[in-house]
Image: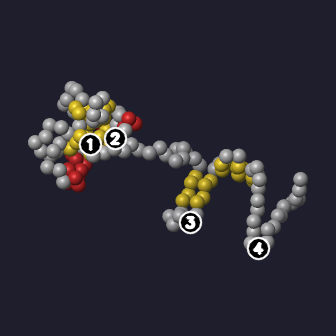
């Protein structure tokens, strides 16, 4: 973590202080571990050579070690309070260039377009759509239900 990453953004810091109603300043630090005896968080603060034990109101776990945390410094106290862990950007749901994805704002329709083929898979069941028009449905057992007519149409229909 670079020194620049440890410096708080002044606007964000002011908003955080106002939201928390704190009397003291806030700062960013790195969570570097926990004390062995009391399991208090250890934070590495800008301007300090050694990690400091801190209080916390956030649920901190081993997976948070190495992450940036927001500290509050209550007026008159030497021990910081960990207010929370800064979130990292979530991993994208799709690759950077998946082709084209369209989502309707009302949530009623989802259109996914792929250049060559699109596969939906769950366990041993799959649906394959290819650009040449082939549609392949595979599964251990396939059931088709219709409350009205259930039609099978094609240039030719082959059973078994």
Q: Quadrant of the N terminus?
A: top left
Q: Which mark is residue 109?
A: none
109 on left or right of 2: right
Q: Residue furthest left?
A: 76
Cβ atoms at labels 3 and 2 below 8 Å apart: no
**Which image quarter: residue 112?**
bottom right
Question: Dot 2: what SS?
Answer: loop
| Residue at point 76%, 56% (across, down) | 142
Q: In the figure, 140 relative to 63: above or below?
A: below
Residue position marked by numbered label 2 in the rendering: 60
Q: Earlier in the sequence, mark 3 or mark 2?
A: 2
| Residue at point 14%, 37% (across, down) | 78
Q: CA distance from mark 4 to mark 3?
A: 23 Å
| Res 86 seen here | no
Q: CA distance from mark 4 to mark 1?
A: 61 Å
Q: Which mark is residue 56?
A: 1
Cβ atoms at labels 4 and 3 below 8 Å apart: no
Horizontal and vertical percent position of residue 135:
75, 53
59 on left or right of 20: right
Cβ atoms at labels 2 and 1 below 8 Å apart: yes
């Amino acid at each position: 973590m670079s020194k620049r990453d440890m410096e708080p953004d002044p606007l964000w810091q002011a908003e955080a202080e106002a939201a928390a109603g704190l009397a003291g300043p806030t700062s960013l630090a790195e969570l570097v571990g926990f004390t062995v005896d009391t399991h208090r968080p250890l934070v590495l603060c800008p301007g300090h050579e050694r990690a400091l034990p801190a209080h916390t109101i956030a649920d901190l776990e081993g997976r948070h070690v190495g992450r940036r945390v927001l500290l509050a410094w209550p007026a008159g106290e030497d021990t910081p309070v960990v207010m929370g862990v800064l979130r990292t950007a979530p991993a994208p749901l799709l690759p950077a260039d998946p082709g084209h994805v369209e989502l309707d704002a009302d949530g009623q329709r989802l259109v996914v377009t792929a250049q060559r083929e699109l596969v939906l898979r769950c366990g041993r069941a799959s649906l394959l759509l290819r650009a040449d028009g082939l549609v392949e449905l595979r599964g251990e057992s396939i059931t088709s239900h219709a409350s009205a007519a259930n039609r099978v149409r094609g240039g030719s229909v082959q059973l078994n």
